[in-house]
Image (cartoon, helix red, strand yellow):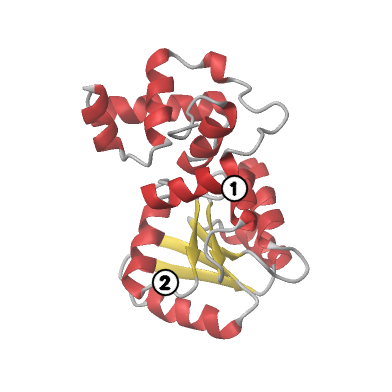
């Protein structure tokens, strides 16, 4: 059973999402919150697998909520997915930096929402190749943050190669084909890279790969 926490200041949206998610045999909404502070408390209390968090809320916004969840060792199993009305914007990128596993637009189709919750619960990032390209073109090509890339020297050549392919939006199976290894070995390379770089998930690997210069956009 996938346990979901809804954090949004719009009761109607929470109600709609809850009705959709609770209708599934493998998904259960365990709590709802109207702001980030309440959401953080409920995350610690209910330990959901996935937290769907609005990016703009009173008291504590989605970015700060994400950052606090990501920083709490007891919440390492909580995968935050950001909800936004506006599509990809700088707030979403900052949320990815803070530790979000990905983001969804609030007018998402029902079947896509259900798929996304299941993807996030597995620990995979909600970053399709098209979204990754937008991330690169709009924000990642800007000057890197101070200290970006720390820990890259700890990666083996194969781990660096795997991270570069993650940054292109490839799945474990696709990475395995590219590297001519098994999917299990590909997953091992990625997991080790995540541990060495202190990345919570694949979304943060994408950000780190481009900010550090490990991967550069085509034409740059």
Q: Position of residue 20 (x, y in %)?
A: 39, 78
Mark nearer the N terminus (2 vs 1)? 1
Residue 143 visible to the viewer: yes
Q: Which residue is drawn at 36% across and 73% down?
A: 109
Q: Residues within 10 Å of mark 2 (few under 14, many from 20)?
A: few
Q: Label 2 to label 1, Cα distance in Å?
A: 26 Å
Question: 64 or 27, which lies in front?
Answer: 64
Instruction: Residue at the far bottom: name it.
Output: 12
- Where, by quadrant of the figure, is residue 182 drawn? top left
Q: In the picture, which quadrant includes the N terminus?
A: bottom left
Figure quadrant of residue 62: bottom right
Tag 2 and tag 1, C-beta contact below 8 Å:
no
Q: Mark 1 points at which residue?
A: 75
Whether residue 1 is visible here, answered yes or no, is no
What is the number of the mark on residue 33?
A: none
Height in image: 218 above or below 152?
Answer: below
| Residue corresponding to mark 2 | 108
Q: Name the residue furthest right.
A: 59
| The quadrant where residue 115 appears | bottom left
- In x, y percent, where is residue 200? 54, 39
Residue visible at 56% across and 50% down in the picture: 100
- Residue 15 in the image: state x and y as whole percent: 51, 83
Q: Which of 143 and 105 is in front in this view?
A: 143
- Where residue 75 appears, as percent x and y from the top left, is 59, 48
Viewer-proximal residue, 2 or 154?
A: 154
Assess disc 1: are there few (<14), some (14-19) or many (≥20) residues with their C-alpha within 10 Å of its C-alpha. some
Up the image or down, 112 lies above or below 167; here it is below
Label 1 sits on a secondary structure element that is helix
């Amino acid at each position: 059973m996938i346990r979901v926490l809804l954090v949004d200041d719009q009761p109607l949206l929470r109600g709609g999402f809850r009705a959709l998610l609770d209708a599934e045999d493998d998904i259960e909404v365990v709590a709802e919150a109207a702001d980030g502070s309440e959401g953080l408390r409920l995350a610690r209390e209910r330990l959901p697998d996935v937290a769907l968090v609005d990016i703009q809320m009173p008291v504590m916004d989605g970015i700060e909520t994400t950052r606090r969840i990501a920083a709490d060792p007891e919440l390492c199993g909580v995968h935050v997915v950001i909800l936004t009305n506006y599509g990809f914007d700088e707030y979403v990128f900052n949320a990815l930096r803070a530790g979000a596993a990905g983001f969804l637009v609030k007018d998402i189709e029902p079947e896509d929402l259900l798929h996304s919750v299941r993807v996030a619960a597995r620990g995979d990032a909600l970053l399709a190749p098209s979204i990754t390209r937008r991330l690169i073109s709009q924000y990642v090509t800007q000057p890197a943050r101070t200290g970006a890339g720390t820990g890259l020297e700890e990666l083996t050549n194969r781990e660096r190669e795997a991270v570069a392919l993650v940054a292109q939006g490839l799945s474990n199976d696709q990475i395995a084909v590219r590297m001519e290894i098994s999917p299990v070995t590909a997953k091992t390379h990625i997991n080790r890279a995540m541990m060495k770089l202190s990345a919570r998930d694949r979304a943060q690997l994408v950000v780190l790969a481009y900010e550090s210069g490990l991967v550069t956009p085509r034409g740059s």
